[in-house]
Image: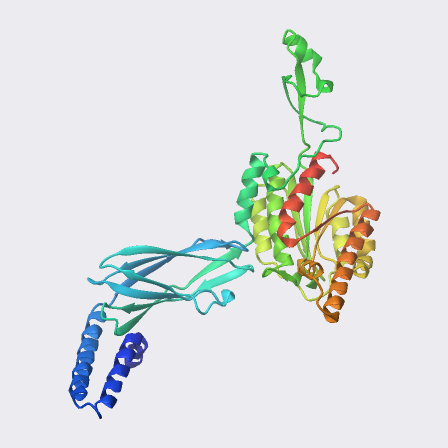
Amino acid sequence: MIKRFYKSLFFSRRWYALWVGVILLFILSYWISLLFVVSQLIALFIFVASTLDYLVLFSRKQPVEVQRQLPERFSNGDHNPVKLVVTNQYPFRVSYRIIDELPDQFQRRDFHLDGVLKPGETIGLSYGLRPTQRGEYVFHDINVYIKSPFGLIVRRKVLPAEKMVRVLPSYFTLRKYELQAFSSNLAESGNKRMRKQGQSLEFEQIKEYVTGDDIRSLNWKATARKGGQLMVNNFTDEKSQQVYCLIDKGRIMKMPFEGISLLDYAINATLILSRVALIRQDKAGLVTFADQIGTFLPAGRKALQMSNILDILYNQQTKFLETDYERLHALIRTRITQRSLLILFTNFESLSGLQRQMPYIRAIARSHLLLVVFFENTGLQQVRTSPAEDIEGLYIKTIAEKFAYEKRLIVKELNRHGIATILTAPEHLTVQTVNRYLEIKARLAI
């Protein structure tokens, strides 16, 4: 009981400042005798005021009520709102400091919210959190430090509020792309319209001719039935094509950019691309691999397919061994028998690293349409563009140029074998990948 009492009672800076002043007055009273009586009176006043402050603050068992309102899940890499609802149970005005014990992953030890509450007042406090890795985040207790108008005694109240929140791949961005895909308006996200080569064989409907329709699709029989009103056949993009995202979980995907690993960038892009593919009536599938095959989800269009993809991506972690592309090729050869669009999220930092895996990549590309997506090193880009101030800086800049040149050689080598590539900065990965998928659909390349 005494231990709990000491944990909940503190003295404010004002209390210490007043006692320092009293001590100085006692010291000065050696030369000015009148100050001795004044010092005694002030000390007595501080003692009485502190006692009254203590009695007032500890008169209620529940002085302040705080409720934390959290979403059921957090979106990785995005700012997620957290709200605290604070209610003053005292009949007088109080000052407060709230220290919310955030999950360990954020490593924030200086987080607090300060303010003043009127008698019986209820307010809402909001703040945002940006997680940079997936997993389970545990919020702990809420600590409230309360001061009365006297401001001498501080009461600490610990409110149990432990709660676990799952951090999933970026579903905030998913919602944006989902709405744009439904409205067929992806140009705002950077998509450019591609001219179709040829036309799809999937018939959709017969409609009246309007200016701009292809006259080669005129339906003469329907035109005759309409009494001369021109009618045309309307075609739509082919559907039910298989789109697989292949996610490399090897050590090369551990590299972080802006606090988020390349694996998380790939996972966020996979989540959005899979949703866009499903909206476009294609089948979405998933393969994760490293030194072993991680997860294989057959391509499908079932109602639960998106939930299955999200559950799989939630728990993926990088490995510290080198990726085995031979196992990936064996899996694709045996499990993916229909020609499909395979989007491989990986990273190569050197041409020699690509050449070790090139036989398996070429073997995969012979049976499927393969798109290799890897990353620019934006950190090296800053080194390349900054001026060199000394010999050491010149060496560093030369090495950065060499790595950038290696990336261009990798693109050239893949293109030489007829393999499509995307070399992009991590923050542009989602837009670039979705645009290329829509371009491939428009060209009927699958």
Query: Which residue is located at x 73 percent, y 71 percent?
Result: 392
Q: Residue furthest front?
A: 31
Residue 37: tell me if it is visible.
yes
**The residue positioned farthest toward the top in the image shown:** 227
Question: Measured from the top left, where is residue 349 in percent x and y?
Answer: 75, 60
On the image, the x and y values in percent for residue 60 come to: 22, 67
Which quarter of the rendered picture does the N terminus lie within?
bottom left
Q: What colouring style does the render use?
A: rainbow
Q: Depth check: give the residue in front, 270 or 386.
A: 386
Q: Residue at x 34, y 59 (%)?
A: 67
Between residue 433 and residue 318, name the one nearer to us.
Answer: 433
Nearest the viewer among 305 and 260 is 260
Figure check: 326 above or below 196: below
Q: Is residue 70 above or below residue 106?
A: above
Q: Is residue 301 visible?
A: no
Q: Quadrant of residue 326?
A: bottom right
- Image-based side of 80 in relation to 120, left or right: right
> On the picture, is 138 further left or further right than 389?
left
The quarter holding residue 122 reads bottom left
User: How many numbered marks have been drawn onto this rendered protein structure?
Assistant: 0
376 lies left or right of 264 = right
Relative image position of residue 217 (x, y in whole percent): 71, 19
